[in-house]
Amino acid sequence: MDMLINLLALAFIGFIVWWFWLAKSGDVQMVRDSIDVIVDGGIYSPAIIEVGRGQSIILNFIRRDVSPCAGQVIFAELGISAELPLTESKKIELTLDNEGEFGFTCQMGMYRGKLIVK
Amino acid sequence: MDSNVSKQTIIRLSVGGMSCAGCVAAVEDTLKAVPGVAEANVNFAEHTAEVMGSVTAEVLINAVVAAGYEAAELKGGNEEAEQKEAAELEYYRQLQKQSVVAAVVGAPLFLMGLLGAMPGMSGAGRLFWLVVAALSLFVLVYSGGRFFSGAWKSFKNHNANMDTLIALGTGTAWGYSLLIVLVPTLVPEQARHVYFEAAVIIIALINFGSALEMRARGKTSEAIKRLVGLQPKTARVLRNGQEVDVPIEQVGLDETLRLRPGEKIAVDGVIIEGHTSVNESMLSGEPMPVEKQLGDEVVAGTINKSGTVLFRATRIGKDTALARIIEMVRQAQNSKPAIGRLADRIAALFVPTVLIIAVLTFLAWFNFGPEPRVAYVLVTTMTVLIIACPCALGLATPISIMVGVGKAAEYGVLIRNGEALQRAGQLTTVVLDKTGTVTEGRPTVTKLVAIDGDQEGLLRLAASLEAGSEHPLAEAIVTAAKQRNLDLAKVKNFTAIAGHGVQGEVNGQQLLLGNQKFMVDQQIDFSAFLDQAQSLAAQAQTPMFVAADGRCLGIVAVADPIKVDSRAAIERLQRAGLKVVMLTGDNRATAEAVARQVGVDEVMAEVLPGEKADKVAELQGRGEVVAMVGDGINDAPALARADVGFAIGTGTDVAIESADVTLMRGSLHGVVDAVEVSKATLRNIKQNLFGAFVYNSLGIPVAAGLLFPFTGLLLNPVIAGAAMAMSSVTVVSNANRLRWFKPQDKH
């Protein structure tokens, strides 16, 4: 029994490593012109957004989460940030000319999302 | 939901430059041609356009401007802030309520536990515990439901956050306790302890901590609230010959507004009738009122002092200087300097790491812990989950940046981003441009030396030649001629040689006007005036030689008064341990005379405009971290080259793109204020980061029971909950101390 519990615990560690760090989220959204990003329950949905290089897009952030942590979205590598009001949507216009991955987070880096430019 | 289609929104624009009904059709067609526009209506009488569609105001404005008209969005500046405040207040109250409900259920249970009055697990005791299980489940759902739903949503997204830790910690405690109540025989008798009260009190404490944190956070954005509060809600507009008070969001471009003494200015504009003085201190930090007359600009948010004037609206809505300042401060407040990146990287890995530590704690106590091991395993694992606080770490940098950038704005110092704020605290050398930075930038003619004694004749020639030049020294000469009512002759073939002088043909004579270098290059003999030129330069005046047809006619000397507080500000910079260098295109003798008066450490004179950036690079090559302070337009390359570029603004001119820091006031004290705010903010960030690292790196091992083998002590999960709730409150409160920042030995 003890052995089984030990093995289960070790397997759980393996699961944590795989689920949070190694596994890729399947929820990747392609965007052509504009997309709604819902901010609710501690996450951005969709959190992973794919966009073509040089393409102009509008990210339309809709905040439903009352927590003050959700009040800002920051694209640190792009030097863009925006306040997200609770009652209305906030549009962020972007044209990304370089391929790569650009994260966006809340002020504390707990809400996390990323733009993949291909 | 189809997430690729954004919602239809209505955007209202004020459109300027429409002179006839034909323009209405042109603007309407332009708007309708914008992709995403479903409907566009232009109202000629109001000079407004209403557009419906999935499109942004910026795109519409660009289209209207490209069609040859002006446009700006009609939108209330205060609405967003008011909505945010109302939503935050509601959330604060909700947190308080949730905290109180949890405390009402948890506190009696906690007290019973302390007094040893808990019933057993048999008979009526069991029934009691089943009721407690139901009550605590209600609390977990009502007061802690968002932790569980947040944790689940994050989990599905391959993410983990603070909700994950709280939900796992309290959920495990509740689940284990229920198991004990339902099947007590599963664990040895001495391990049959329930933790309903711990789960509930932890939820109460965390909600209470979040409410306190929200309150403290509200104070961190005081600077923005103060700026937003400067915007009046109504304006007095002249329409159809009548003065009417209208909401600020209805004021259109080109409308005429009436401004009476004591009133706040509603939008940016240009005075078209009357004169007055305006208090601009709320934006620029400059305490003296500024005189305004016909043609002068007035800016929204400043206060009219004495006169009644009419002005024409030139910038409205989010285009006003005030709105741009607010936007710039907001952007800067949300940006992160390099110092915060490590914490960010750690925060991203933090929660899964804590989960792993919790499992390792479980394994350690399970395999090596004393009996009853199940109880020890549960308490330590739960405590590890509860005590870990990624929030303190994540908040450490941004919350201090928010207060620091806001504080700087109060002193008229606009810092572009967190990176600039961090670098401003690491400077070793400050390079000051002379004209307009150390000096007023308004030179006047101080001396005329003519070979034939005809001073007015000399001035007339010099002014005629300079009439076409935009150089500040040229302006001084032309102004002096106008003051003496001299008639100026026409100049032909005018050429300006940067850093040297100007030449041209006046009354058939080939005229030259410039510095000594220019005369040498042009092989003009100026030896008769050399002594006088040197003596003028030694008195901080700039001598310029005038020559006609190869013969030196005399000297026009110009001096630019030194700003009254330049010396004091330079002394403050030096006391702050900074080396102060003055950079100028002026001749060495004049530059050194100015340098002596203001007390700089080093002078770089006779530097051509294009060489300024090289001089900055030269200092950087010596290992110095260099700030360049200049006017933002002529000095743009040097500002960009410097580690921190400071643009000295005039009044409320904030559109200085090349600068990391914009000083809205003309005084050099702003540079020292920026350096001091930066140092204070960096110190604050370091304290926060240190506190958050120490808290987590001590708290987690103690919670895991590292002290148990030596002291026999274990951390109570309720204490861990209190510590975790207070850790982020402490970080926010420490950042709030920056609100009391005052520049040292201030002027």
Image (cartoon, rainbow, N blue to C red):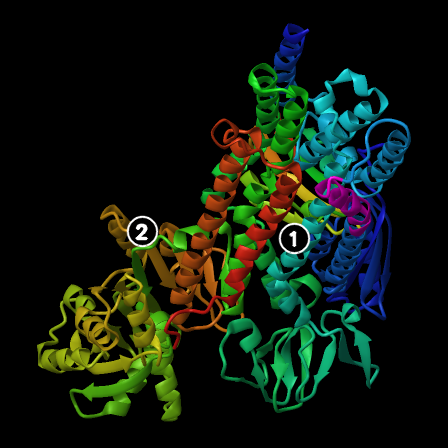
* Percent x, y of residue B606: 22, 64
The image shows residue B186, relative to residue B305, as above or below, that is above
Q: Nearer the viewer, residue A100 or B93?
A: B93
Please, what is the three-letter code of the amino acid marked with disc 2? Val
Q: Verify whether residue B112 appears in magenta.
A: yes
Measured in 3D between alpha carbons, the distance from the residue under mark 2 to the one under mark 1, in whole angstroms, is: 37 Å
Please, what is the three-letter code of the amino acid marked with disc 1? Glu
Would you say B5 lies left or right of B553 here? right
Main SS, magenta residues: helix
Q: Nearer the viewer, residue B172 or B109?
A: B109
Regarding residue B464, the answer to whether it shows in the image is yes
Local SS, label 2: loop
* Percent x, y of residue B55: 78, 46
The residue sitting at 58% across, 14% down in the picture is B367
Would you say B555 lies left or right of B485 here? left
Q: Nearer the viewer, residue B554 or B80?
A: B80
Image quadrant in which the N terminus of chain B is located: top right
Label 1 environment density (alpha carbons within 10 Å; few <14, some 14–19, many ≥20) = many
Label 2 environment density (alpha carbons within 10 Å; few <14, some 14–19, many ≥20) = many
Q: Return the disc, 2 or 1, that comes first in the chain's sequence.
A: 1
Residue holding disc 1: B213
Q: Which residues are magenta?
A: B100-116
The disc label shown at residue B625, or none: 2
Would you say A45 lies left or right of B603 here? right
* Percent x, y of residue B713: 55, 34
The disc label shown at residue B21, or none: none
The answer to whether mark 2 and mark 1 are in CB contact below 8 A is no
